[in-house]
Amino acid sequence: MNKKKYFDFVIVGQGLAGLAAAYYASEQGTVALVSKENFNISNSYLAQGGIASAISPDDSIKQHYKDTIAVGKNLCNKKAVKILVAEGKNIVREIISLGMKFDRNNTELDISLEGGHSKRRVLHSNGSSTGKELVRFFRSLITKNENITLFGNSFLFRILVRNRDAHGALFYNYKTQKDFRLLTYRTIIATGGLAGIYHKSTNPLSTSGDGIIAAYNAGAEIENIEFIQFHPTALNKKSCPPFLLSEALRGDGALLVDNNGKRIFSNTELTELSPRDELSKAIYQYISAGKNRNVFLSLSQIEKSVIRRKFSYLLNELKKYGIDIITSGIPVAPAAHYTVGGIKTGLFGETNITGLYAIGEAASAGVHGANRLASNSLLECLVFAKRCVKHSRSSSFTTPIKPEPESSLTIEDKNEKIFHKVRNQIAKILWEDVGIIRNAASLIRAKEKLSKLREKYSIPGNEYYLLQIQNLIQLALLLTNGALARKESRGCHIRSDYPNQNKKFERNSSQINKHTRLLKIRRER
């Protein structure tokens, strides 16, 4: 039966948000840091973009704020954005002082321009490996910390809640094939988003919304989940994964061209550095408009020495797929990339359940609105990890931690094939019917298919694969219900039957599990 351990903090997720939270929390007490996979797999680790910060002399916090608000299409929480850009600038300086190294031109920081930004303000580390370097940096800060205990290869089974107070979580370890409890008054969800459940995604398969659905099942509020950002330039080649192609390529001059090498958007208001939602929609529509229409990312405008210096990772990775980015165009198309909404939080990562926090891509802190500004995600991880830990120390709890009746997880190997089959079905439903461009007919069709799957697999018990199936179906339904309720196009939520923004929907959507499925569009906090 499962063992119980008490920690001052239990942090679920091994990406940048989780690692940063563990670092800051270790100064306050004992920390359990739990990872679903090994500690080298996360969206943060794979992130090719940089980290946005207004540290250049010709930039300002005010301008960074304005750009974020503009891309968010009037749905951002303005207080949260002010916190992000102001505290973000300070925290970037802080980690530089701690030893984090960003790329430089001689002695000056090498600052890039990315889509939606009006100024060069994106810092990179080791070219297009910024996420990896930040993860490595924070991992180095916590590896030998005696206050931090690592739990790898462990799946989040359930968040433990009594009387609206969270007091830990139940996990299952794949290696030992045993479940275990970690008890605490401060549970921090930093598990990333859910875009990995789409058929075409830049995310690893492990990005499947585990923390979001666990929080939903525990009674946490889910906000703006219909906003899934599609990255406009993912590798589009048969038998190859939709490998992400850094936005910094376009920032340095890469162009979007057709089969004949002609620039596609030269006679439109769009440019290669338009916000991601606008560019993804345009590329998708261009490819869909006729047979054999392809889009390529051409690096011919970038000096070869710059490509080798700044984009060596991409150069080497794409050679594995038979593409030399120096001499040939890269076939691209949009792919599901980032979960803009998530677990609703306040300005310190706090949820509607006392003691339960959410940070990073799993959370909806209000900083992204209807569409995330490029390279604000890594910044969000750092800012709200620090705020979350600070706030959690002052939280008050009314329910003492007491053991619950035991309920162990079981695994039946016969259900593994069923799980993969259903996951593929869900991925296809979402891609075809809840994709870049949606409408009432496609969303209703998706809901009907998903409801049939839910009815078929609503089997009681604690069997691992069946629980995974039920969770994936519920996540897909949350997405679909949110998209159906929002009868407008705003940011990365695009409906062909409601092509314009509607002032009526300048609000946050909200879904909460109270044994019935409720959906409301709520006004901004």
Image (cartoon, rainbow, N blue to C red):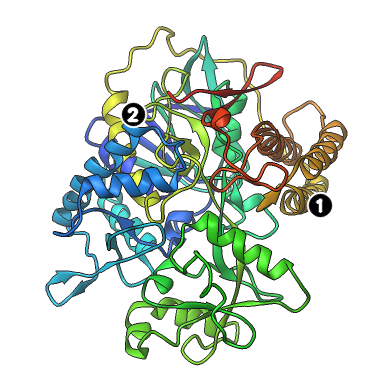
Residue 119: % across, % down:
28, 60
Residue 329 visible? The answer is yes
The quadrant of the picture occupied by the C terminus is top left
Q: In this picture, is 312 found above or below 412?
A: below
Locate residue 319, reporting x and y percent.
53, 85
Marks 1/2: CA distance?
39 Å
Left or right of 490 on screen, residue 384: left
Q: Is residue 131 left or right of residue 387?
A: right
Residues at badges 1 and 2 in contact (C-beta under 8 Å)?
no
Q: Is residue 6 left or right of residue 41?
A: left
Q: Is residue 326 placed above or below 377 in the rendered structure?
A: below
Count how many numbered circles sit on residues in the image: 2
Q: Which mark is on residue 421?
A: 1
Q: Nearer the viewer, residue 522 or 489?
A: 489
Q: Residue drawn at (32%, 17%), measured in percent from left and top? A: 395
Q: First in sequence, mark 1 or 2: give its number.
A: 2
Task: Mark 2: give few (<14), some (14-19) or many (20+) Cα within 10 Å.
Answer: many
Q: Amino acid at mark 2?
A: Phe
In the image as oriented, which residue stretches furthest toward the bottom?
327
Q: Which mark is residue 173?
A: none
